[in-house]
Image (cartoon, helix red, strand yellow):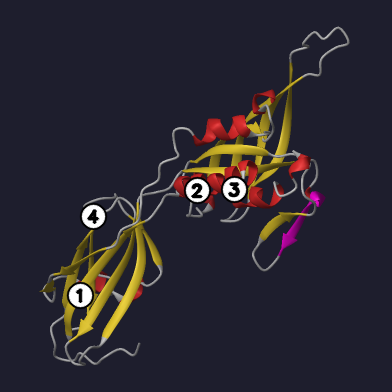
Amino acid sequence: MKTTSLLSYLLFPLLLTSSSMAVERELEIRDCSANNSSEIPSIESMENRRVLSNGINSKFTFKVSPTTKKVLVEESIKKSRFEEDILTLKEIATILILSPVAKTFGQKEQCVEYSQTLERAYVTLKVIDSNEENSTSSYHFIAEPEDHFYLSANMLISKIKELHYIKEENSFIEKEQPSSFYFGFNYKLGDLYTQYPLDKFYNNMSLKAMAKFSEKPNESMGLGVGYHFNEYVEFFVAKVWTDDHESVQRANLGRTAATTYGVSFNLTKALGWIGNRESY
């Protein structure tokens, strides 16, 4: 079946993925009045944030209400972007093959320290208040090291008019489904989920290796450099080497190199494109 060889290259040996298991434990509440508590973030401020860490054994300190009786932490495994892309690639293979703030006057400030036990973690902190029976508040955030590797669906373009700009999301989508596209294996110099200012523009750049999504992907392959304008938009320039057509005498004419431009999409974009299998 078409594209089987390309999927074999990309999926092997990355087919095994770890399961997610939640682990809950109690954190020690300690007095932090003597410390410079103004620099310690409150536990409420962590809600829905992503915090860069050094992985396992990274430590975080948070302020909690003086009336806090108990703090529980629960961790579950978070996959990297590359691992998430591998799961999306499996889907492609399947398709192809088949509250108010309390007053705390005169009370000591309290803190808890959370030590990360998973390399990448979804963290839930459950705060139990001693003033109100059975009163529990939960706060969620992500703790993980920088993310650099990812897969992409790369669409070659000759002019920007081939794309449609979505103002609400500050992003682009294709006006028409491309007749062909390239899988990309990428490395962003900076963190994948961080948009860097102009004085650190190089961290928004990425290195790309590409192979055409076809029965014989090695017939057209390329190397490129991309730039992330935001979380949703990455444009690239690449040098692509493509096998020439055979001559009348059936002699191979070699490969032709060409400089081309394009836009990289999240790998889930390819799921929609390959719905029309006859195009590839």
- Tell whether 5 sits left or right of 127: right
Q: Is residue 189 highlighted in magenta?
A: no
- In which quadrant will I find the N terminus? top right
Q: Which residue is mark 1?
A: 71
Q: Position of residue 90 (x, y in %)?
A: 53, 45
Q: Quadrant of residue 212?
A: top right
Q: Nearer the viewer, mark 2 or mark 4?
A: 2
Can you tell which of label 3 and label 1 is closer to the viewer? Answer: 3
Label 2, label 1: how far apart the Cα atoms are: 34 Å
* Residue ID for mark 4: 117
Mark 4 crowdedness (10 Å alpha carbons): few <14, some 14-19, many ≥20: some
Q: Is residue 157 visible?
A: no
Q: Secondary structure at mark 1?
A: strand
User: Picture coordinates of residue 216 (x, y %)?
Assistant: 67, 26
Circle 2 residue? 87
- Vertical relation: 61 (above or below) 238: below
